[in-house]
Image (spheres, rainbow, N blue to C red):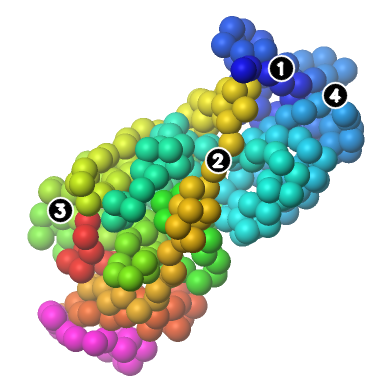
C-alpha cells in the first residue's frame, strides 16, 4: 500500500532542484517536499519561504517522515542521516563516502529504529545495481562484481586511448565539462570507486569492509609508455573495481587500473559512462551499462528510491542476515604490471613469481604475481614512487 511522503530535502543544487521539479509533476505517488535545508541565502528559483537554514527545522519536524540528503560534505551528511534515522524518518542518500565509512552503524540504526535507508544513487548513478544485487542476485551463485564505477576517470582514459590526448589535456577537458573537480584526486586516485565498491560488496556478499583495508590505486601516474604498451597488446587501460568470490566463503576486492582486451564487456565502456559485469555460476556474465554521474542520472536514482519508500520498501540485506556474510581475504595473488625508471623501486615489491621483464633506456617494466596483502603493506609508498601499476586480469575469474 502506498503512503504519503512528506519530504525534507537537504541540498538544492542541480540534482535537488531537478528532483523538486519532477516531484511536482509526478503522478506515480503522493509526495511533497515540505522544507528544503540549505547552507546560505542566495537568489534561487523558488521563493524564500521554501527554505530553512537549520537542519533541526527538518529533523525535529514530526510531520516530515522522509529525508532526502543530497549534500557534498560527508561529515555533515553523516550527522543528518544519523539523526533522521534516530527520529524514525526514512532516508534517501547519495553520499557514497559517508555510507562506505559508516555502513555498520547505518545498518544498526535501521534495525534499532525500524526505518529504511535507501542509497541507489550512491553507487552507479542511473544503473540500478544495488537493487538488483539485493533482490535478483540473492543466492549463493554470485562469483564476482566487476565494474567501471567512476565516470570522471573513465572519461579521461577514453580521451587518451580513443582520441590520443595526453593525460593533462584529458583531465582539463573533464574539469571544463564538470566531470572532474578542480582537485580531481577523489576520482582519479580511485577513492570514489572504492567507496562505491564497499557498498556493492555489502549487497553482493553480505560483508562490511573498512575502506582503509582495500588496495586502491588510481590513474594519475599513467605515462605515454604505459599507454603504448597497452596499445601494442591490443588493450586499453581502465580504472576497475572488483569484488570476487574465493574458496571457503572468502572474497577479495581492490580498485586498480587494469589492462583490458576486447573480449571484456567493460573494454567498450567509454566517456563518463559506467559499466558493471555480474558473474555467476549458473548465469555466467550479465552486463549493466549507463551514465554513472550527472544531475539527471543521479536524480533518476534518487527518485527511484523515493518511489520505493512510498511502497514501504527497504533493503533486507539478505546475504548478511541469512548467510552471515563472507570473509575478506587479502592473500589472493594477482598478476601485476609495474612500470618504473629506477630499478631500485622493485625492492618494495615482494613478488611470488616474475613472469615477464623488460629493460629500456628510460622506462622498464616487470610483470609478476604478488599477494594483495603485500601491496597493502606499501600502499602509501605506491603513491609516492615514480611508477605506474596495473593488474593484467589473468588471475581473475572475469
Q: Position of residue 242 (x, y in %)?
A: 35, 58
Q: Residue at x 50, y 72 (%)?
A: 213
The answer for how far apart the CA atoms under marks 4 and 2 are is: 24 Å
Please say if the residues under marks 1 and 4 sit with CB atoms less than 8 Å apart: no
Q: Position of residue 148 (x, y in %)?
A: 35, 48
Q: Is residue 370 above or below residue 9?
A: below
Which quadrant of the figure has residue 71?
top right
**Mark 1 crowdedness (10 Å alpha carbons): few <14, some 14-19, many ≥20:** some
Magenta range is: 342-359
Give whichever of discs 1 and 3 has the lower sequence position.
1
Give whichever of discs 1 and 4 has the lower sequence position.
1
Q: Secondary structure at mark 1?
A: loop
Q: Quadrant of the C terminus?
A: bottom left
Q: Nearer the viewer, mark 1 or mark 3?
A: 1
Residue placed under numbered mark 4 in the picture: 63
Q: Is residue 179 above or below residue 393?
A: above
Residue placed under numbered mark 1 in the picture: 4
Amino acid at each position: 500500500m502506498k503512503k504519503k511522503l512528506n519530504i525534507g530535502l537537504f541540498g538544492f543544487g542541480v540534482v535537488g532542484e531537478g528532483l523538486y521539479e519532477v516531484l511536482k509533476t509526478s503522478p506515480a505517488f503522493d509526495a511533497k517536499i515540505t522544507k528544503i535545508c540549505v547552507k546560505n541565502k542566495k537568489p534561487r528559483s523558488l521563493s524564500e519561504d521554501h527554505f530553512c537554514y537549520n537542519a533541526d527545522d527538518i529533523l525535529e519536524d514530526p510531520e516530515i517522515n522522509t529525508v532526502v540528503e543530497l549534500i557534498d560534505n560527508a561529515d555533515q551528511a553523516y550527522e543528518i542521516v544519523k539523526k533522521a534515522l534516530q527520529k524514525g524518518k526514512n532516508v534517501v542518500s547519495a553520499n557514497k563516502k559517508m555510507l562506505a565509512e559508516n555502513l555498520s552503524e547505518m545498518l544498526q540504526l535501521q534495525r534499532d529504529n525500524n526505518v529504511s535507508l535507501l542509497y541507489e544513487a550512491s553507487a552507479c548513478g542511473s544503473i540500478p545495481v544495488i537493487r538488483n544485487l539485493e533482490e535478483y542476485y540473492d543466492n549463493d551463485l554470485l562469483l564476482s562484481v566487476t565494474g567501471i564505477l567512476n565516470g570522471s576517470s573513465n572519461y579521461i582514459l577514453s580521451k587518451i586511448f580513443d582520441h590520443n590526448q595526453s593525460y593533462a589535456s584529458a583531465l582539463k577537458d573533464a574539469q571544463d565539462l564538470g566531470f572532474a573537480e578542480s582537485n580531481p584526486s577523489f576520482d582519479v586516485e580511485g577513492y570514489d570507486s572504492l567507496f562505491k565498491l564497499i557498498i556493492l560488496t555489502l549487497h553482493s556478499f553480505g560483508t562490511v569492509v573498512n575502506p582503509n583495508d582495500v588496495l586502491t590505486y588510481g590513474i594519475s601516474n599513467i605515462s605515454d609508455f604505459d599507454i603504448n604498451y597497452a596499445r601494442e597488446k591490443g588493450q586499453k587501460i581502465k580504472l576497475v573495481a572488483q569484488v570476487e568470490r574465493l574458496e571457503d566463503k572468502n572474497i577479495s576486492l581492490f580498485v586498480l587500473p587494469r589492462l583490458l582486451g576486447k573480449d571484456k564487456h567493460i573494454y567498450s565502456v567509454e566517456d563518463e559512462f559506467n559499466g558493471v559485469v555480474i558473474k555467476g555460476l549458473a548465469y555466467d556474465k550479465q552486463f549493466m551499462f549507463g551514465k554513472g554521474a550527472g544531475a539527471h542520472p543521479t536524480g533518476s536514482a534518487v527518485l527511484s528510491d523515493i518511489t520505493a519508500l512510498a511502497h514501504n520498501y527497504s533493503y533486507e540485506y539478505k546475504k548478511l542476515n541469512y548467510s552471515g556474510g563472507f570473509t575478506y581475504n587479502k592473500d589472493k595473488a594477482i598478476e601485476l604490471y609495474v612500470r618504473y625508471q629506477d630499478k631500485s623501486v622493485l625492492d618494495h615489491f615482494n613478488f611470488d613469481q616474475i613472469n615477464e621483464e623488460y629493460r629500456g633506456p628510460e622506462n622498464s617494466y616487470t610483470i609478476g604475481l604478488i599477494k594483495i596483502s603485500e601491496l597493502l603493506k606499501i600502499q602509501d609508498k605506491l603513491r609516492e614512487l615514480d611508477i605506474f601499476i596495473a593488474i593484467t586480469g589473468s588471475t581473475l575469474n572475469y
